Image: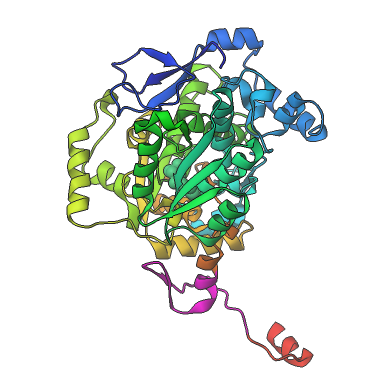
């Protein structure tokens, strides 16, 4: 690890530095989450980095041209590692495990913006500029089809540096697909625990195909996470390296989604970033990215954050909006959170949503997410399954296939626009976290099957954007009639 890298408890009262080669990802008290921290002055002096973001765009062009060349060129071709001075824990290119992740895209989508009620940006003189409101950050273009690859390349690079022999995760699907891909690339045995029947088919198919040992646990995501924590944290003698987002190196990689957004916007921060919330690693990583860039003097303001839960898995929404729990300078009301979890258990309340990716009861990064909401003046909302599927279809119609959880961001942005919290003239970036082909069943049920298709225990209503396949005779005239 580079000597300017350490781990530190997120508790502001505990400023002690821990070694970065540690593989227990909790503070010594056994429960507080850790951050990766850097001595930025030293890192940038020794790396000769002048904090000029133009370098990152230049690498994009260079890396694309010589991706088969030296290792440096391979790093330049990665949408994560072309920003390496902003996550500077890796010593040398050969320490990095990369499969060309992060070649994703920020697209201004005027047609969808108009449909949702955003206005083209108005200039002070009343004229219209070319700055309409809605941008989609399409992370489905990653090698495993979801944004998880951003974090996985970073955590696998850490795992390689500490000599991990086995890697494990619990997952609602995408983390397992991503882990499986990187484990095969790194040549390390990968183990994934998924809730039996709880993950979408495309994701299960990936984990199997990439060769991870896939354990279908008789329980949900929360149960799987509890088991992998027992395996990795409580039994260090097993040498099993944990790849869930409790691992702070995962979040270092996830920061780069925001770097790419900024890169595409000429390093002018948007007004809002809207992201679906599950285990709450990504929203936490986004806030860390903006806070660090602000401290480094590379941006002059921090955007606002909207975290969108599914109504059937709205733990954060309840904790933030109903119980009013806040970061509170690191002294968040943990007793009330524990009471809420006990209440959920006693009431038999289990997460259930068509957006299986975010079907989580106890988000492990909750304290970091509360900090992120504090740093980014954030809001939290929930959207129901009907609304998620409608917005998924709208996103599809406007050029991007995404999975249900991803569409929660667009549905949430519309809700915030209707509430007047997002203004129609603001610049809003919605993160489309995973590809449509991750969950083809949900899509086909929505469009084609029947009024109340079922995904697990969740009814999927047939909505106004559904596009039924039309049965037709094997006859050209009949086909022409149907073509209108
Ligand atoms: N969108 C998708 C497509 C996801 O797969 C996830 C999380 C999220 C959003 C939420 O991100 O956890 O950082 O708040 N999926 C995890 C998994 C939990 O196991 O694949 P988060």
Does the rendering let one see residue 129?
no
In this view, the residue in front, 186 or 433, is: 186
Rendering coords of residue 92 (x, y %): 66, 19
* Residue 456 falls inside the magenta stretch: yes
Along the horizontal axis of the image, is 83 left or right of 13?
right
| Residue 461 found in image quarter | bottom left
Please, is residue 236 above or below residue 467 in the view?
Answer: above
* Residue closest to the far front: 237
Rendering coords of residue 306 (x, y %): 41, 42
Along the horizontal axis of the image, is 235 left or right of 73?
left
Does the rendering let one see residue 87?
yes
Instruction: Identify the magenta region.
Output: 444-470
Please, is residue 125 above or below residue 157 in the view?
Answer: below
* Residue 23 falls inside the magenta stretch: no
In this view, the residue in front, 26 or 53, is: 26
- Going 30% across and 27% down the picture, which residue do you hit? 30
Way the structure is coloured: rainbow
- Going 30% across and 48% down the picture, which residue do you hit? 315
- Going 35% across and 23% down the picture, which residue do you hit? 10
Which quarter of the rendered picture does the C terminus lie within? bottom right
| Residue 12 found in image quarter | top left
Numbered label tally: 0
Please, is residue 398 above or below residue 99 in the view?
Answer: below
Rendering coords of residue 129 (x, y %): 62, 42
Rendering coords of residue 135 (x, y %): 57, 46
Which quarter of the rendered picture does the N terminus lie within? top right
């Amino acid at each position: 690890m580079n000597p300017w890298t350490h781990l530190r408890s997120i508790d502001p009262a505990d400023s002690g530095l821990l070694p970065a080669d540690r593989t227990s990802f909790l503070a010594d008290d056994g429960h507080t989450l850790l951050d990766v921290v850097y001595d930025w002055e030293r890192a940038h002096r020794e790396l000769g980095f002048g904090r000029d973001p133009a370098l990152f765009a230049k690498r994009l062009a260079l890396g694309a041209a010589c991706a088969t060349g030296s290792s440096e060129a391979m790093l330049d071709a990665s949408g994560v590692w072309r920003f390496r001075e902003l996550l500077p824990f890796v010593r040398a290119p050969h320490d990095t495990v990369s499969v060309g992740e992060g070649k994703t895209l920020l697209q201004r989508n005027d047609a969808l913006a108009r449909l949702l009620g955003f206005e083209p940006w108005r200039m002070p003189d009343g004229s219209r500029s070319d700055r309409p409101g809605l941008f989609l950050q399409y992370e489905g273009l990653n090698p495993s089809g979801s944004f998880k690859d951003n974090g996985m390349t970073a955590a696998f690079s850490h795992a390689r540096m500490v000599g991990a022999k086995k890697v494990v995760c619990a997952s609602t699907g995408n983390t397992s697909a991503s882990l499986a891909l990187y484990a095969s690339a790194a040549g390390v045995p990968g183990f994934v625990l998924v809730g039996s029947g709880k993950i979408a088919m495309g994701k299960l198919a990936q984990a199997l195909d990439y060769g991870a040992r896939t354990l279908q646990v008789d329980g949900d995501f929360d149960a799987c996470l509890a088991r992998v924590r027992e395996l990795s944290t409580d039994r260090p003698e097993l040498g099993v390296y944990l790849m869930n987002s409790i691992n702070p190196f995962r979040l270092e990689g996830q920061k780069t989604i925001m770097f790419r957004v900024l890169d595409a916007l000429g390093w002018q921060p948007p007004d809002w970033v809207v992201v679906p919330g599950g285990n709450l690693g990504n929203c936490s990583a986004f806030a860390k990215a903006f806070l660090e860039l602000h401290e480094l003097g590379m941006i002059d303001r921090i955007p606002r954050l909207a975290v969108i839960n599914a109504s059937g898995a709205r733990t954060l929404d309840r904790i933030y909006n109903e119980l009013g729990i806040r970061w509170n300078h690191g002294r968040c009301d943990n007793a009330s959170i524990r009471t809420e979890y006990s209440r959920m258990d006693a009431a038999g309340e289990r997460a259930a949503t068509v957006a299986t990716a975010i079907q989580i009861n106890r988000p492990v990064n909750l304290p970091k997410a509360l900090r992120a909401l504090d740093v980014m003046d954030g809001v939290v909302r929930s959207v129901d399954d009907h609304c998620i599927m409608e917005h998924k279809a709208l996103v599809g119609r406007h050029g991007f296939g995404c999975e249900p959880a991803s569409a929660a961001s667009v549905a949430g942005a519309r809700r915030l626009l209707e509430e007047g919290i997002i203004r129609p003239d603001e610049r809003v970036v919605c993160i489309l976290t995973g590809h449509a082909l991750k969950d083809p069943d949900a899509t086909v049920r929505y469009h084609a099957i029947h009024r109340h298709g079922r995904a697990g225990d969740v009814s999927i209503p047939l909505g106004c954007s559904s596009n039924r396949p039309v049965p037709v005779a094997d006859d050209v005239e009949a086909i022409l009639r149907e073509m209108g």
